[in-house]
């Protein structure tokens, strides 16, 4: 009881920080720690299971396509200098191969480099809360970065590193075919939109990337430093959610 009460208080405080008033009927608000979540009502973030299972068995679905991209990238990629600058492992991506919502970040940090999973450090914890505030679960979306190896001292990715690695991100998007992409921060938005504009200039608008709608917003690490921008980020996430719901039809519950 104590734990769920604390979790609820934490959730309310976080939503208040994001500028969300009142309570929500979203599924994530109704689940208690330790309780099995209800299955998502279709159409949800993932397509219906039979099609996905059939495709996977045939080896031509998004999961198989992602496996092929991961294999081609390889565990010891040396396409840029980051392989000799202290990275421990290639951090490919995580989540549902058939996700309708995809988040793209910049590059792995120390925690991600250690665990081999994107967004697991402090910024990752904030991203998880943002996903849950939208009413979704982290495992139902897909999360990847523009570059797959940690830059030393968490410096910004360099143009040659982005150029060597971004084709793999583009192919991940092609494999997953999300309905909506949320680009987290300047590097993700610039790589996907082929622009030099900063995230402050890009956010607040909706773009197109291939067949997907692209919503740029602030990077969670920036939001940790500048919490006053969380309200803007929440507006962007609401826009992303509305686009997903529009695509799924007016009666969809997500
Ligand atoms: N920041 C990113 O851009 N990606 C991660 O995976 C973690 C932090």
Image (tube, rainbow, N blue to C red):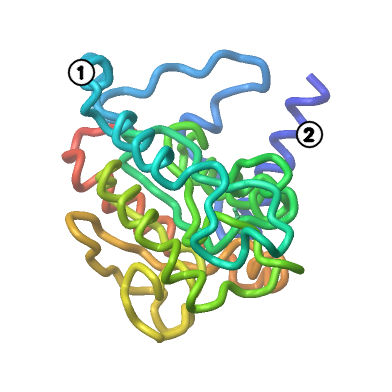
Q: Is residue 222 left or right of residue 248?
A: right
Image x and y of residue 43, in percent = 24, 29
Which one is in front, 90 or 208? 90
The label nearer to you, 2 versus 1, is 1
Q: Residue at x 18, y 40 (%)?
A: 250
Which one is in front, 221 or 175? 175
Q: Is residue 95 left or right of residue 1?
A: left
Q: Residue furthest right?
A: 2
For mark 1, give the secondary structure.
helix
Residue that carries the numbered disc 1 in the rendered image: 58
Q: Which mark is residue 6?
A: 2
Q: Quadrant of the C terminus?
A: top left
Which mark is first along the chain, 1 or 2?
Answer: 2
Q: Residue at x 59, y 67 (%)?
A: 81
Q: Is residue 195 left or right of residue 18?
A: left
Q: Is residue 175 left or right of residue 128?
A: left
């Amino acid at each position: 009881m104590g734990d769920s009460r604390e979790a609820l208080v934490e959730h309310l405080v976080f939503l208040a920080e994001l500028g969300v008033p009142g309570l929500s009927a979203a599924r994530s608000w109704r689940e208690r720690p330790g309780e099995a979540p209800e299955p998502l009502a279709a159409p949800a973030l993932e397509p219906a299971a039979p099609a996905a299972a059939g495709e996977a068995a045939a080896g031509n679905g998004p999961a198989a396509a992602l496996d092929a991209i991961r294999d081609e990238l390889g565990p010891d990629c040396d396409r840029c200098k980051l392989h000799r600058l202290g990275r421990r492992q290639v951090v490919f991506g995580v989540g549902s191969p058939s996700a309708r919502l995809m988040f793209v970040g910049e590059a792995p940090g120390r925690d991600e480099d250690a665990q081999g999973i994107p967004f697991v450090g402090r910024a990752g914890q904030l991203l998880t809360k943002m996903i849950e505030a939208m009413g979704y679960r982290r495992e139902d979306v897909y999360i990847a970065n523009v570059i797959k190896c940690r830059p030393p001292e968490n410096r910004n990715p360099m143009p040659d590193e982005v150029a060597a690695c971004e084709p793999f991100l583009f192919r991940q998007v092609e494999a997953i075919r999300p309905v909506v992409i949320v680009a987290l921060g300047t590097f993700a938005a610039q790589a996907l939109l082929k622009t030099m504009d900063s995230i402050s200039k890009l956010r607040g608008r909706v773009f197109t990337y291939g067949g997907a709608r692209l919503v740029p917003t602030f990077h969670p690490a920036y939001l940790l430093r500048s919490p006053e921008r969380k309200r803007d980020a929440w507006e962007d996430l609401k826009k992303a959610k509305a686009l997903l719901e529009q695509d799924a039809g007016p009666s969809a519950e997500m």
